[in-house]
Image (spheres, grey):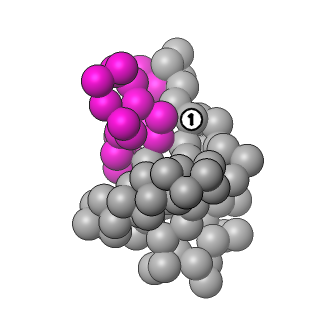
């Protein structure tokens, strides 16, 4: 797993961002975290994974680039909407 230089953070994780990122980088379990990643297929804009899914052995050989993290799937969807808007305004 690789993190983008400009990482989008959902509001529910904003206060504990450093702790969550540290645990993720150490490979420790973090519950209720969803990752917005670069699309794995050209027809998609982004992919959303639970952090638990990215801990599966497959992703050690097929790492993803995480562009944002959120505290729920719904928040991750909102984060994607924000990322699209930001990209359209030249911010990403």
Number of numbered discs on residues: 1
Q: At 54% from the left edge and 25% from the top edge, which residue is drawn?
A: 63
Q: Is residue 51 left or right of residue 2?
A: left
Q: Nearer the viewer, residue 67 or 31?
A: 67
Please give the residue where the numbered disc 1 appears in the rendered image.
65
Residue 12, percent from left and from top: 46, 79
Compared with 88, 46 (above or below) is: above
Q: Secondary structure at mark 1?
A: strand
Residue 11 drawn above or below residue 18: below
Q: Is residue 55 visible?
A: no
**Residues in magenta, as a range:** 37-59
x, y percentage for residue 54? Answer: 43, 38
82 shown above or below 28: below
Please give the name of the residue rendered at 29% of the width and 24% of the height, measured from the top-left corner: 43
In the rendered image of this protein, does residue 73 appear above or below residue 17? above
Identify the residue shown where x is 39% and y is 24%: 40
Q: Mark 1 Cα within 10 Å, few/some/many (few <14, many 20+)?
A: some
The residue under the point 49% across, 51% down is: 88
């Amino acid at each position: 797993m690789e993190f983008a230089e400009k990482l989008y953070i959902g509001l529910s994780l904003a206060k504990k961002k450093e702790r969550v990122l540290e645990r993720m980088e150490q490979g420790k379990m973090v519950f209720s975290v969803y990752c917005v990643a670069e699309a794995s297929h050209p027809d998609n804009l982004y992919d959303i994974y639970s952090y638990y899914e990215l801990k599966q052995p497959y992703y050690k050989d097929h790492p993803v680039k995480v562009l944002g993290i959120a505290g729920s799937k719904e928040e991750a969807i909102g984060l994607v909407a924000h990322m699209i808007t930001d990209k359209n305004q030249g911010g990403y």
